[in-house]
Image (cartoon, rainbow, N blue to C red):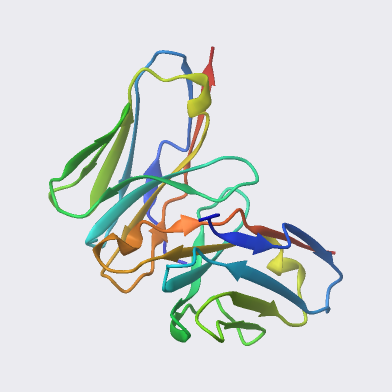
């Protein structure tokens, strides 16, 4: 099925470092979402973006909805060990309900 | 509000058998979604309901798959004549719909292994 291009696939960082990951699509989306998934669990919503150019923060997390509506990025500042997990971007074309997910970015944080 | 509940958490079945999964959404959510996730991939959309109406089905949902939400509350996903390629995590999510409808709440999933 169709998926977004998410990069990087994995990251190994030191505690305290900042992290940046992004998603691109050949299609225009009206909504971008960022989720975190831990082993054996379902994805948990981190940030939702509804307008092109929108910049939204949730604690140490910041995400932006690209102006072209074809991309989004997620930044994590001052990473901590509990940030470990797989981060997914997801886009939606309209309010029809279907989300298209990226392949995920696996984050490892070394204390 | 106890979140989205899925049952069972794990299911091992022999090829050719039928399996059924259940999802109980957050009670005030009118939309319910099914996704499938294989190892190393993001979730892939299967189908979704608004109340009891099934509004969209993915091409991934072959004739062997059927989903129901008979009273607009819980939903079931049945796979008939399971194949090894059906092995995956099946995720259910629910939402209120509307502008914040994409803030889906996901359940913990049902992991299916077909042997």
If the image is split into quadrants, where does the C terminus of chain A sit? top right
At a point 87% along the width and 70% down the height, the residue shown is: B14
Task: Looking at this view, name the residue that lies furthest to the front.
Answer: B1
Residue located at (36% from left, 70% from top): A97
Q: Which residue is painted at 42% across and 72% down in the image? A: B31
**Image quadrant in which you'd find residue B51:** bottom left
Percent position of residue B24, x then y: 58, 67
Residue A21 in the image: above or below residue B30: above
Locate residue B7, reporting x and y percent. 70, 63
The residue located at (61%, 60%) in the rendering is B5
Q: Nearer the viewer, residue B86 or B106?
A: B106
Residue A73 horizontal/vertical position (percent): 28, 39
Q: Which quadrant of the figure has residue B60?
A: bottom right
Depicted A81 relative to depicted A24: above or below: above
Q: Give the vertical position of A22 relative to B49 (above or below).
A: above
Left or right: residue A36 versus residue B70 is left
Q: How many marks?
A: 0
| A24 sits to left or right of A1 | left
């Amino acid at each position: 099925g169709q998926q977004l291009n998410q990069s990087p696939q994995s990251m190994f960082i030191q505690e305290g470092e900042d992290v940046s990951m992004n998603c691109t699509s050949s299609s225009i989306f009206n909504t971008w979402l960022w989720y975190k998934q831990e082993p054996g669990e379902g994805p948990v919503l981190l940030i939702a973006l509804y307008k092109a150019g929108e910049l939204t923060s949730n604690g140490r997390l910041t995400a932006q909805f690209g102006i072209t509506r074809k991309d989004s990025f997620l930044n994590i500042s001052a990473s901590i060990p509990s940030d470990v997990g797989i981060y997914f971007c997801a886009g939606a074309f309209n309010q029809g309900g279907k989300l298209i997910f990226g392949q995920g970015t696996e984050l490892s944080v070394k204390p | 509000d106890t979140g989205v509940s899925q049952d069972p958490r794990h299911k091992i079945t022999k090829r050719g058998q039928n399996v059924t999964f259940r999802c109980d959404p957050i009670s005030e959510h009118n939309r319910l979604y099914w996704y499938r996730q294989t190892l190393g991939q993001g979730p892939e959309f299967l189908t979704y309901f608004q109340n009891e109406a099934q509004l969209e089905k993915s091409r991934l949902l072959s004739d062997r798959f059927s989903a129901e939400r008979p009273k607009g509350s819980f939903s079931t996903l049945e796979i008939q004549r399971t194949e090894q390629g059906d092995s995956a995590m099946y995720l259910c999510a629910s939402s209120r719909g509307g502008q914040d409808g994409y803030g889906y709440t996901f359940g913990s999933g049902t992991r299916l292994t077909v042997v």
